[in-house]
Image (tube, rainbow, N blue to C red):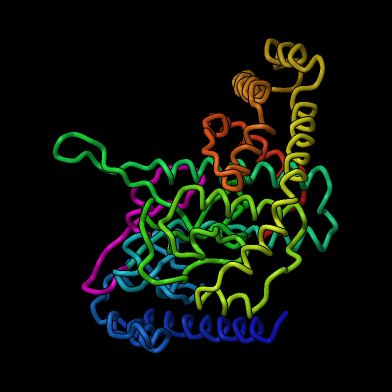
């Protein structure tokens, strides 16, 4: 762990103690003081002028529980509402958070975090978002390397299922619609996420996969006004690095790079600080050339992994004579130690198996991910149709494989 990580963790612990102390003070006093506002002004001095616009009742509804992060868009806390439910509270400037608000209110997907509340107060904005109790893909990758899971069939299958669910999330983002306009046409609210990386993909302990952090999301076709900022190397697409108008292929490009990094078990860094400096100054050619040399040869390896995973899934979920066995159990559940509800569960499983048989996993998945490198638009409707099967398999692997860091 670097010295910077140590400093960050120490600072988070100190802030955590400060929050606990403030909560005790609030519990002891009948009248609500402006303690939270004073705390925020000290924590985020660059945005201190906007916090006076936030009414104190916000901090009555949502009690700050833990400091999460501080970034360009503002500060993020884990909070609890009046019923004790966990949520994320983001506080920042309206100009920085409005795109995230519009994106999350336009998208409906089981693989994207939900927005509970979004309110503007003058120049300030407060977002209350779903909190995913789990780990991110970066933590999973570290655990996989530590336990030598990388390269195993179970790890490759597990990662493939996650990639599928993120693809369905991206499909929802890229095709989202708003309300009807005055002539009855749906408003186009399609977005590009622009920040696909391990830390922004959460795996919940309940088996869900969620794409988070829409702080950099922009509408399709939007041209950045701030040159060459707001991207994560090495996942950022050439369009992002060159500050060109955003395209949906940018997200697929990032996901492809992420997939290769996950299957490789990490990134053998091919870029350094001098590359970042050159990019910020407008010199992108050297970095993009090294990026192409690193990732492009690995596409064949990616395809072979998907082919092997497809074989594993068909063997694992559609074994010989399995349908005959299911029928026997379904017709006589009590003889097999089950209940009448078992018949319904088996019928649901049969639907999943039928989808698994019809689903051309390897070809479709590879085509969707390789499209940005070949500049070919790919229809990923098969991936979307298979979302229930993906979730079913994801639950299976969460239950049978100890790939996740268990909660304390």
Q: Farthest left residue?
A: 182
Left or right relative to 175: residue 54? left
Residue 330 vertical placement versus 120 (above, below): above
State which quarter of the image contains the N terminus: bottom right
Left or right position of 174 against 150:
left
Q: Quadrant of residue 141?
A: bottom right
Identify the image quadrant of the C terminus: bottom right
Number of numbered discs: 0
Whole-percent x, y for residue 311 in the image: 78, 30
**Residue shown at 27%/63% (left/top)?**
119
Is 78 located above or below residue 183 in the figure? below
Whether residue 169 appears in this view of the structure is yes
Give whichever of 89, 375 is nearer the camera.
375
Give yes or no for residue 109 being in the magenta stretch. Answer: yes
Place residue 98 in its image quadrant. Answer: bottom left
Relative side of 49 to 110, left or right: left
Q: Is residue 408 visible?
A: no
x 38%, y 51%: residue: 220
Residue drawn 72% across the image and 16% down it: 326
Say if the magenta span includes residue 283: no
Q: Is residue 195 left or right of residue 29?
A: right
Q: Residue at x 64, y 54 (%)?
A: 257
| Residue nearer the viewer, 266 or 5 | 266
Give percent across and percent down for residue 93.
Answer: 32, 73
The residue segment tinted magenta is: 100-125
Residue 156's x, y, as percent?
76, 45
Q: Position of residue 301 (x, y in %)?
A: 77, 45
Q: Nearer the viewer, residue 337 or 289?
A: 289
């Amino acid at each position: 762990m670097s010295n910077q990580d140590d400093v960050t963790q120490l600072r988070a612990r100190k802030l955590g103690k400060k929050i606990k102390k403030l909560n005790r003070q609030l519990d002891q006093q009948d009248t609500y003081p402006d303690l939270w506002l004073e705390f925020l002004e000290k924590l985020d001095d660059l945005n201190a002028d906007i916090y006076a616009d936030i009414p104190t009742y916000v901090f009555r509804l949502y009690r700050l529980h833990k400091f999460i992060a501080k970034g360009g868009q503002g500060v993020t806390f884990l909070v609890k509402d009046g019923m004790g439910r966990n949520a994320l509270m983001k506080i920042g400037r309206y100009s920085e958070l409005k795109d995230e608000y519009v994106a999350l209110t336009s998208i409906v997907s089981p693989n994207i975090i939900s927005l509970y509340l979004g309110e503007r107060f003058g120049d300030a904005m407060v977002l209350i978002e779903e909190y995913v109790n789990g780990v991110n893909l970066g933590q999973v990758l570290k655990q996989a390397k530590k336990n030598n899971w990388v390269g195993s069939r179970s790890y490759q299958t597990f990662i493939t299922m996650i990639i599928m669910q993120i693809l369905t999330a991206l499909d929802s983002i890229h095709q989202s619609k708003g309300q009807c306009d005055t002539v009855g046409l749906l408003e186009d609210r399609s977005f590009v996420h622009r920040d696909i990386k391990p830390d922004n993909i959460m795996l919940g302990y309940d088996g869900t996969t969620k794409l988070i952090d829409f702080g950099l999301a922009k509408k399709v076709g939007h041209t950045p006004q701030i040159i060459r900022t707001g991207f994560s190397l090495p996942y950022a697409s050439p369009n992002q690095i060159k500050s060109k108008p955003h395209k949906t292929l940018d997200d697929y490009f990032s996901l492809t790079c992420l997939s290769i990094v996950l299957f490789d078990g990490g990134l053998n860094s091919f870029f350094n600080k001098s590359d970042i400096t050159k990019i910020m100054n407008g010199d992108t050619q050297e970095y993009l050339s090294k990026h192409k040399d690193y990732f492009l040869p690995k596409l064949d390896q990616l395809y072979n992994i998907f082919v092997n995973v497809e074989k594993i899934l068909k063997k694992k979920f559609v074994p010989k004579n399995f349908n005959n066995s299911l029928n026997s159990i379904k017709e006589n559940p009590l003889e097999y130690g089950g209940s009448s509800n078992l018949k319904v569960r088996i019928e649901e499983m049969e639907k999943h198996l039928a989808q698994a048989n019809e689903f051309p996993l390897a070809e479709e998945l590879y085509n969707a991910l390789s499209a940005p490198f070949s500049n070919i638009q790919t229809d990923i409707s098969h991936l979307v149709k298979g979302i229930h099967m993906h979730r079913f398999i994801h639950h299976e692997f969460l239950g049978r494989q100890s790939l996740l860091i268990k909660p304390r």
